[in-house]
Amino acid sequence: MMNIRAGTRIAEAISSPTSPLLDLGTMSECSQDKACELLRSSHSGISSAESRLRRGQYGPNVVSREQRVPLLREIWSRARSPLNALLLALSLVSYALGDIRAAIVISAIVVLSVGMAFLQEHRSSQAAAKLRAMVRTTASVCRPGETHPRTEDIAVDDLVPGDVVALSAGDLIPADLRLLDATDLYVNQSALSGEAMPVEKQAAPPRNFIEDALDRSNLCFMGSNVVSGFARGLVIRTGADTFFGALAEKVVAQQEETAFDRGIKRFTWLMVGVTLVLGPSVFLINGITKGDWLQALLFAVAIAVGLTPEMLPMAVTVNLAKGALAMARSKVIVKRLDAIQNLGAMDILCTDKTGTLTQDKIILKQHVDIHGADSPRVLHYAYLNSYFQSGLKNLLDVAVLEHGDVHEALGVDEHFQKIGEIPFDFSRRRLSVIVSGGHDRHILICKGAVEEIFAVSTRYEDAGTIKTLDARHLKTAKEETVLLNKSGFRVVAVAYKEMSGTKPDYGVEDENDLVLLGYISFLDPPKESARKAIAALQASGVRVKILTGDNEVITRKICGDVGIQVAQDVLLGPHLEAMTDVELASTAASATVFAKLTPGQKERIVRLLRASGHVVGFLGDGINDGPALKSADVGVSVDSAADIARDSADIILLEKNLLVLREGVIEGRKVFANITKYIRMGASSNFGNMFSVLGASILLPFIPLTAIQVLTNNLLYDLSQTAIPTDTVDEEYIASPRRWDIAGIFRFMLVLGPVSSIFDYLTFAMMLFVFKAWTNPALFQTGWFVESLLTQTLIIHVIRTGRIPFIESSASPALVTTSLLIAGAGICLPFIGIGTALGFVSLPLLYWPMLAAILLLYAILAHLAKVWFVRRWGL
């Protein structure tokens, strides 16, 4: 998230704009009519034909981070890493020393790593792009009409300067705007300014000079979102010309480094450090003992390459890309590749109730007075409220408006006219519209949460008579709503107040002394799949917590229906406010259900759970879910979500189903498992090679392997590992969340590494004492090359599973095939022309049964060491 200093940069940009567009200061200080004139537009916007012409002039309304990355830049993003930098430096050293073959092999290793990573990520990006096209964000724009203005929805990408857009709660600000009119408009622009609280915006020019554009009340900027109210704004800048676009690549697009990223980086630098220490040591030992400093240097360079986990970036990227492709086939859009791993590591899923546990198909079932008797008048007033409100119409409003016969019965178009509106917000939890009811009278109709309507009502209507609402009536009314909630109904209260039609403007202060009219109740049945999905998530080690703005009673009912046990009191928003962070962190860890929450309280719970060491996911789709989605380790939303929810999420589901999410969790764990296989294998193998190389360098009167032999071994070995992303994963490994454990990898390296070194020394003994290779360096080098390649290729099949390899758990066909092909290539090399060019010679017949025995013993001992390790520390 951008900090407050970004606001300063924006202010500096305003003083010296680089865009040929009109200066924002001028647009802010002039009147609304003048602003339209300057952009050759009007309060009704521009025509569709004019919009198409301007699109050719200004280009798409897309910021740099959303634009398609050029091919060369995409390749460069994969190529730049400390490992590749080290390898290319070693390639240059080899070239400078005259070993062109070594330089070519090292370069080939880099090309292999970068190429595979690029191809896989490019494929996943293409698949994700096709899915993203299905969930394009739209904006409601005004168009001039023959008789009166009209509105139409167009893709945000197609907005141009001069367009007039309508805004309501939940909308993202789609471009830089000059407001033409606004009603109770509050905008969250924390992504630009760092200021957490929403700011009020108005259409009128500021009375005094304001230097910082963000403080100008009649300007709204791309990157912010509407919290409440509604407005119309004139588009003045789009795409890269907006301040968000100018700063996106430098500031906004920077993602917070995850624990997984930090773990990969730590392991990378650990292995680079080992290489930088061992390389010079090998050089000095061989130079001193052999006297051939050039060959010692070439050998040291080759050993440095061999110790470098150069395929790690490829392994990580290919695994993540494969996971993204698998999820794309299930209609799941992955906006950030590393979110897949975070999904697999997730141990707590916080989710809203509506549409996740329920069917998201709201049905209006009842409209009753405060005694529970059917009341058409309650339905009529609820209809007027939903019909005339200008904000984001939720599913409750849609259910009310489906009663189209009410429109005709009331004669809404003939007898009622909207006068004003008091928009919904999450602190009041109610919305009012003011309509003229004839005879110079205004009617304020308020609809909202039962508790909030009770708080501003002093009277009630009973059979057309207005009576005083006392404590007894309130108790009866609350008991009635509780009974409805217990039956699974969501209850909304309706109240009104008649006033003389002399007041020009209305505000929150007018929501008082209301007449309670009755209630409308809705049914949102639980999903049939919810119980099964929650059970599956919990069986997978993911605790599901419900964070909802709904009341306690109906939340308990729905949770019971889907199998979520509420073993203790539900934690309510008002109680939560009184807790310190320490108290809430402790309570949040044990509580399962949270009700009557504000958006800020949802975000606070998620943040404190993360601070307690949990990996937290959040699934939400409403405008009140944006802060929590951003705070979670992995934010998940759906294609039908509010703009701010989709923008804040890392993963978007094209089907709002927890079963789909559970599949994503499993896919994330598979990705992490296969990445870990490569890391464990590379770490243990390299650690063992360190002992083998040092010992051979001291004991032998010649270079243990020539530089080109080491590099060929490394290249073949790397090729055998390219199929790891396709490997199967044992069920027990994905049964619970998996997190990065650098200490565990280090322990594994210390245990398994020396095992491989033991059999290297057995090979040394075999070649020196059985085949008398003391005076035959080529024979020794050939024998160690084949043994080293086969043991390294074999070890992945031992390490990849906690079970007995080949018997209880088998690798994927692709991994088996690459292993066999590389092992076959290693065996054949000494007998073909390429092997001769590499300095290899034919091996004695006795070598092969002895090698088979070494490989069998190695597999058994490595498996026993692994079993001991798993029993002690787990896999």
Image: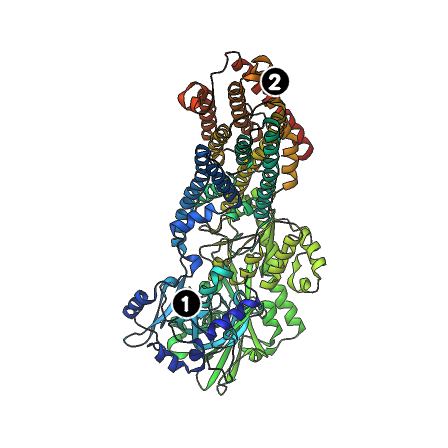
Q: Residue 832 in the image: state x and y as whole percent.
A: 41, 20
Residue extending farthest to the bottom is 502
Q: Which of pointers 2 and 1 indicates the residue nearer the eye? A: 2
Residue for badge 2? 765
Q: In which quarter of the image is residue 479?
A: bottom right
Residue count near mark 2 (Cα–Cα under 10 Å), binned few <14, some 14–19, many ≥20: some
555 to 296, vertically: above or below: below
**For residue 718, side relative to residue 478 (left or right):** left
Q: Which of 373 and 621 is in front in this view?
A: 621
The amino acid on which the numbered mark 1 sits, given as a three-letter code, is Asp
279 to 461, vertically: above or below: above
Give the alpha-carbon distance from disc 2 to disc 1, as whole Å: 71 Å
Q: Nearer the viewer, residue 444 or 696?
A: 696
Q: Residue 291 carries which label?
A: none
Q: Residue at x 40, y 64 (%)?
A: 239
- In the rendered structure, which disc, 2 or 1, sits on the residue that comes first in sequence? 1
Residue count near mark 1 (Cα–Cα under 10 Å), binned few <14, some 14–19, many ≥20: many
Residue extending farthest to the top is 846
Q: Residue 83 in the image: state x and y as whole percent.
A: 52, 42
The amino acid on which the numbered mark 2 sits, given as a three-letter code, is Ala
- Which type of secondary structure does the marked residue at label 1 adopt? helix
Q: Quadrant of residue 341?
A: top right
